[in-house]
Amino acid sequence: MRGGGIPFFEVTPTEVKVAAVGYANAKKREMISWAMGAHPEANWPMYKKNGAMLVSEAQAEHMADAIAAIYAGIKGNSFQQMLALRQ
């Protein structure tokens, strides 16, 4: 598929979870933990509570899902076929 001349690749929620943590029933917290481990340099939304810095799951889940969607898209057959054709 193409959007404005730029190729894009659809992924399902299951593909996103499997690409990140390896199974389809991953919980929000697992996805966030995976993404934070894979990309600690990202600007994760944090807040302070009782002197401890905690991640804001409500905000971080969207970042985690976006990162995992990129990983899923890169692993997909359509993307891999496109890469093979360009080489």
Image (cartoon, grey):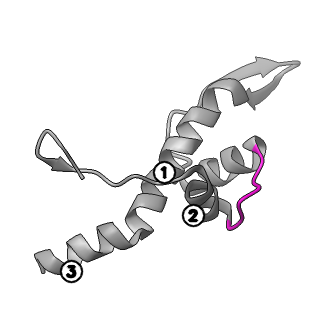
Instruction: Answer left or right for 87 relative to 43.
Output: left
Q: Is residue 56 visible?
A: no
| Vertical side of 54 occupied by 79: above or below | below
- Is 45 part of what is drawn in magenta? no
Q: Which residues are magenta?
A: 22-27
The residue that mark 3 highlights is: 84
What's the CA distance linking mark 2 and mark 1?
A: 8 Å
Name the secondary structure under disc 3: helix
Total marks shown come to 3
Which three-letter amino acid code belongs to the residue tagged 1?
Ala
Name the secondary structure under disc 2: helix
What's the CA distance linking mark 2 and mark 3?
A: 21 Å
| Vertical side of 8 occupied by 72: above or below | below
Q: Nearer the viewer, residue 16 or 43?
A: 16
Binning the other alpha carbons within 10 Å of mark 2 as few (below 14), some (14 to 19) or many (20 upward) gives many
Residue at 34% x, 55% y is: 9
Residue at 24% x, 53% y is: 1
What's the CA distance linking mark 3 and mark 1?
A: 21 Å
Q: Nearer the viewer, residue 48 or 18?
A: 18
* For marks 2 and 1 on the same chain, the one whose residue lies earlier in the sequence: 2
Query: Which numbered marker is on residue 19?
Result: 2
Q: Is residue 4 visible?
A: yes
The residue that mark 1 highlights is: 69
Residue at 40% x, 52% y is: 10
Residue 63, image quadrant:
top right
Which three-letter amino acid code belongs to the residue tagged 3?
Ala
| Vertical side of 42 occupied by 11: above or below | below
Name the secondary structure under disc 1: helix
